[in-house]
Image (cartoon, rainbow, N blue to C red):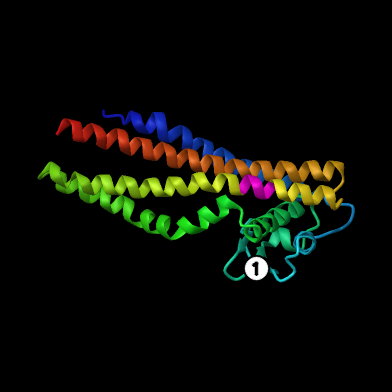
Amino acid sequence: MYIDWTYVVLILPAVLLSLWASRRVDSTFRKYQQQYNYRGMTGAQAARYVLDRNGLSSIRIEHISGNLTDHFDPKDNVIRLSDGVYNSSSSAAVGVACHEAGHAIQHSVNYLPIRIRTAIIPITNFGSKLAMPLILIGLLLSSFSPVFSWFTDAGIICFGLCTLFQLVTLPTEFDASRRAIQCIESGNLLSGEELAGAKKVLSAAALTYVAALAVSLAQLLRFIILFGNRRDDN
C-alpha cells in the first residue's frame, strides 16, 4: 500500500494544529463570553471609544450576523461586529471589537504590513484560483512531454502567493491585538481579570493565523518536493 509520506510528515501535523487552534479560539471565546465587564460596555461601544479616541469618528459600526464574523472593511469604512460581540458586554466581546478597531487604526496610520496585504489581495485571489488547475494541467501534459512542466511551476508560484498573503497577515493581526490591548488599558475599559480574559481571547485568535500559515507553508513545501522529484525523474 502506497503511503504519501509528504502528507503524513508535512500536511497532517499542520492540519491538526489548525483544528486545535480553531477549537481553542471557540472554547476560549465561549468561556470569556460569560465574563461581563464591570462597566457594562458593549463591544460596539468599546470599538466606538477606540475609534473616537484615535480621530476615526467617521468610521461606522454595524451589526452582522454569524459567529466571530467580525471584521473591518476599509472600502466601506465600517467595522462589522457579530452577534456575540456587538451588543455583548463580555470581556471577550470588548477584546474582539477593539481588535477590529485596531485594524482601522492601522489603515489610518498607513501601517506598512496592512498596506502590503491590501496591495496583494487581488494577486493572491487570482493566484488561489489558478494554482491547482495549473498544477493539474502540468501533471497531465508533462506525461506527454517534460516541456509542459512549466504549468506546474506556474501553479506552485501561484500557491506561493497565497502563502505570502498568510505570512503578511501575521504581523497585521498581532499588531491589531497590541493596539487593542493598549487602548483597553489606557481607557480602563476592563479591570484585571477582565483584561486577562480579553488577552487570552486575542491570543487564541492569533494562533489560528499561525496555524493557517503553517498549513500553507506545509502544502507549498509538499508541492515543491513532489513535483521537484517528478522533474528529476523525467
| 3 vs 227, nearest the viewer | 227
Judge whether 148 appears above or below 7 on screen. below
* Secondary-structure class at tag 1: strand
Q: Magenta stretch: residue 144 in it?
A: no
Identify the residue shown where x is 44% and y is 42%: 216
Q: What stretch is highlighted in magenta?
A: 173-177
Left or right: where 215 falls relative to 232: right
Mark 1 crowd level (few <14, some 14–19, many ≥20, 10 Å Cα): some
Percent x, y for residue 195?
81, 44
Identify the residue shown where x is 47% and y is 32%: 13
Left or right: where 199 falls relative to 15: right
Quarter of the figure with residue 48: bottom right
Left or right: where 60 falls relative to 134: right
Judge whether 66 appears above or below 139 on screen. below
Query: In the orientation shown, which residue stands out farthest toward the left?
Result: 144
- For mark 1, what is the residue? 78
Quarter of the figure with residue 69: bottom right
Identify the residue shown where x is 77% and y is 47%: 182
State whether the magenta stretch is mostly helix, strand or loop. helix
The count of marks equals 1
Q: Quadrant of the C terminus?
A: top left
Amino acid type for the residue under numbered disc 1: Val
Identify the residue shown where x is 60% and y is 65%: 73
Percent x, y for residue 1?
26, 28
